[in-house]
Image (spheres, rainbow, N blue to C red):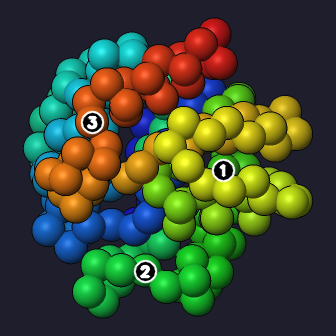
Amino acid sequence: MSGFGDPAARLLVLGLAPAAHGANRTGRVFTGDRSADWLYRAMHKAGFANQPTSTHRGDGLELDGAWVTVAVKCAPPGNAPSPEERDACRPFLEREIALLAGLRVVVCLGAFAYQAATDFFAVKPRPKFGHGVEVAAGHMTLLCSFHPSQQNTFTGKLTEPMIDAVFARAAELCA
């Protein structure tokens, strides 16, 4: 599943894989599930989305200066992508990123997405993943966020102020 957004994006939001009951059901990444609720509310607050929700493909959501995609392009078994699936999908991610010539910032939603981004941008050594970690990758900045999964949001590992801070910082870096 390819991403979507503004072809002139300065911000790339990189997730893991299409969620079985979200993107896989709706046909658009981060759409129709609770992760989408968290993501687009934060993106809207930071000025990257015209509305705070993403419920279905024709819901009117438009991104401004942002592109949202995933490292693994198919919903994996058990909703848990493997490193092998990430590696197999890398050529698709490479082509997608190559079309986004204005990118300056990548928000990595989770350690899995962070690994895909650091591999893609050849970051070595790879700093340890952590929420709010900022990594220089050539002309790009990688910003880390815990994934807005129910596992993280229901337990308080990721809070609204935490994800808001990541997207506020992304907006600063994209300006």
Q: Is there CB contact under 8 Å for labels 1 and 3?
A: no
Position of the N terminus by quadrant: bottom left
Q: Mark 2 packing: few (<14 Cα in 10 Å), some, or many (20+)?
A: some
Q: Percent position (x, y) of residue 89?
A: 58, 77
Q: Residue at x 43, y 37 (%)?
A: 5
Q: Quadrant of residue 140?
A: top right
Q: Quadrant of residue 48?
A: top left
Q: Residue at x 63, y 18 (%)?
A: 174
Question: Which mark is in front, 1 or 3?
Answer: 3
Residue 137 seen anywhere in this rendered image of the structure: yes
Q: Mark 1 packing: few (<14 Cα in 10 Å), some, or many (20+)?
A: some
Disc 2 on helix, strand or loop?
A: loop
Which residue in the structure is indicated by mark 3?
159
Which residue in the structure is indicated by mark 1?
97
Q: Percent position (x, y) of residue 30?
A: 28, 51
Q: Quadrant of residue 169?
A: top right
Which residue in the structure is indicated by mark 2?
81
Q: Residue at x 36, y 80 (%)?
A: 80
Disc 1 on helix, strand or loop?
A: helix
Q: Percent position (x, y) of residue 104?
A: 70, 30
Residue 70 seen anywhere in this rendered image of the structure: no
Position of the C terminus by quadrant: top right
Q: Is residue 11 above or below residue 88?
A: above
> Sequence-wise, which precedes: disc 1 or disc 3?
1
Q: Residue at x 65, y 18 (%)?
A: 173
